[in-house]
Image: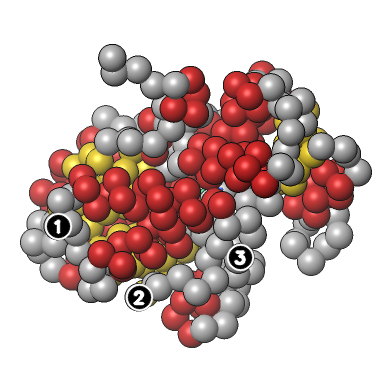
Amino acid sequence: MEVSDGFAGTIGNTPLIRLQRLSEESGCDILGKAEFMNPGGSVKDRAALYIVLDAERRGALRPGGTVVEGTAGNTGIGLAHICNARGYRCIIVIPETQTQEKIDLLRTLGAEVHTVPAVPYRDPNNYQKIASRMASDLDNAIWANQFDNLANRQAHYETTGPEIWTQTEGRIDAFVAATGTGGTLAGVARYLKEQREDIRCVLADPTGSALYRYVTTGQPEVVGGNSITEGIGSSRVTANLEGSPLDDALMIEDQQAVTLVYRLLHEEGLFLGSSTGINVAAAMQLAKRLGPGHTIVTVLCDGGARYYSRLFNLEWLASKGLSAS
Ligand code: PMP
């Protein structure tokens, strides 16, 4: 029988999609790993599962326990599903700058959601630090700590990376992705480099993030203003990202990302979120740099329905000086 075991058994093994128009236009194969097809709707289901399984294995999380996490949304959504399926309580701390759609979904899934002001990481009231304190005040509870918990990167090293290698039959020239925690990029890059050192692994960074400079100069330093993208960009180098075998970084302006999001919708039939716009814009830039005939893989991180009120609201876009084309 071809049957998957519950929610967890359905995570991963996502299709690799050739983006037809963009491939034709660039002369390269532009391939998107369809992470929006995970059962919780994003690339973060993989990390959420690995973090919970690792905590169970270590005995840190026992039956009836609680999972606490600070998240921009998608990790929380993955965790909330997994907690339901495995009988855990789920507490989510989310910055109030994230879309209402993600917050509503988390509540629907039964997570206890705390929205908090968005303050920098160094502030003791940063959402990640609040989550850490909440977990330490509870018995039989873990702080998932996706940013520095290496179970996150391991998920991509053991699953996403090998899937991409198998699906391309090793014919891959470059992998490019934006990072939030760094788990996806770091795990996939490590695995691919072990298969073939010459596969170019490239970071795509939104404005307002410090990682573009980290990769290109060795020192994290914020460049540009606040991006409208959600779940990506970082002011610090996480344990997951540290030491990643990266060759280069590209900085992508919001308008480039928004244009690609709408092109994916209208020309490819794919309704996807803003981080995917950054990723695919970066893949197209990389195609230009490498020239025709290369195979470039990126990540289609999550679906567009999480962003109706912003990315797909033309008035809201205009208020940010952005347009759909
Ligand atoms: N895209 C979206 C929509 C996300 O929510 C995230 C994670 N916050 C990422 C991309 C980045 O993934 P990672 O944490 O593995 O770097």
Q: Secondary structure at mark 2?
A: loop
Relative height, residue 100 to residue 284 (above, below): above
Provide residue 225's location: percent of width, then percent of height. 59, 64
- Say whether marks 2 and 3 touch (CB < 8 Å): no
Horizontal and vertical percent position of residue 235: 64, 67
Q: Which residue carries the number 2 mark?
A: 247
Which of disc 2 and disc 1 is earlier in sequence? 1
Q: Which residue carries the number 3 mark? A: 238
Q: Quadrant of residue 223?
A: bottom right
Quarter of the picture containing the C terminus is top left
Q: Is residue 99 above or below residue 280?
A: above
Residue 6 in sight in this render: yes
Which quadrant of the figure has residue 73? Answer: top right
**Which residue is denoted by mark 1 in the rendering?**
171
Left or right: where 29 falls relative to 318: left
**Could you say whether the residue bearing mark 1 is in a helix, strand or loop?**
loop
The CA distance from mark 2 to mark 3 is 18 Å
Residue 265 seen in this snapshot: no
Q: Earlier in the sequence, mark 1 or mark 3?
A: 1
Name the quarter where the N terminus is drawn: top left
